[in-house]
């Protein structure tokens, strides 16, 4: 049996990447969320590749290496104003080839970053990429 999963992808409106980069980031985002065998329904691409993270409240170099930060919502989270943040670790900054993923605990969309902005901003701050569907074939 196969399934089709339609996913909405969002980027910061003020920081929309070039088209080719968007495609690479979206592919990495989906692969990162699928690491847990989930079917995400919405994914917010929060960053491009970087090698820092917050550990014990301090900003520092991520020991796992370069990654992209995403937040995703499953069908159940769409109406609950919650999401899961994750890192998609990559082998290099250009191809964004997936290496591994880490996932945080579910949190409220309104959770504030150190900058005082919500980790999942309101619609007026987001740019929605063209809708993409993914097919899955049962093994």
Image (cartoon, rainbow, N blue to C red):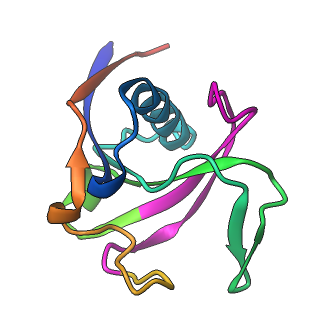
The correct choice, above or below, for 42 with respect to 21 in the image is below
In the image, which residues are magenta?
Answer: 84-110
Image location of residue 29, percent across then percent down: 47, 39
From the viewer's perspective, is 56 left or right of 48?
A: right
Query: As rendered, which of 99 and 19 lies closer to the eye?
Result: 19
The correct choice, above or below, for 114 with respect to 7 in the image is below
The correct choice, above or below, for 24 with respect to 43 in the image is above
For the N terminus, the image quarter is top left
Name the chief secondary structure element in magenta. strand
Write the residue at 60% across / 52% down. 87
**Residue 71 appears in which quarter of the rendering?**
bottom left
Write the residue at 24% across / 56% down. 126
The correct choice, above or below, for 91 with respect to 50 in the image is above
Q: Residue furthest right?
A: 63
Write the residue at 39% across / 32% down. 18
From the viewer's perspective, is 91 left or right of 129?
A: right
Query: As rendered, which of 136 and 43 lies closer to the eye?
Result: 43
The image shows a total of numbered marks equal to 0
Image location of residue 39, percent across then percent down: 37, 38
Image location of residue 97, percent across then percent down: 66, 27
Write the residue at 41% across / 84% down. 112
Asked if residue 83 lies in the magenta stretch, the reply is no
Asked if residue 88 lies in the magenta stretch, the reply is yes
Image location of residue 73, percent across then percent down: 33, 54
């Amino acid at each position: 049996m196969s399934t089709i999963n339609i996913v909405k992808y969002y980027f910061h409106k003020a920081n929309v990447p070039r088209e080719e980069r968007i495609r690479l980031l979206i592919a990495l985002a989906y692969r990162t969320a699928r690491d847990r065998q989930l079917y995400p329904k919405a994914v917010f691409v929060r960053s491009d590749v970087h090698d820092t993270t917050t550990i014990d409240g301090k900003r520092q170099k991520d020991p796992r290496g370069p990654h992209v930060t995403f937040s995703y919502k499953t069908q159940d989270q769409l109406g609950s104003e919650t999401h899961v943040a994750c890192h998609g670790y990559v082998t290099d900054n250009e191809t964004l080839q997936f290496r591994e993923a880490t996932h945080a605990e579910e949190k409220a969309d309104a959770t504030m970053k150190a900058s005082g902005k919500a980790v999942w901003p309101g619609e007026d701050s987001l740019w929605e990429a063209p809708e993409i569907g993914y097919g899955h074939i049962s093994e």
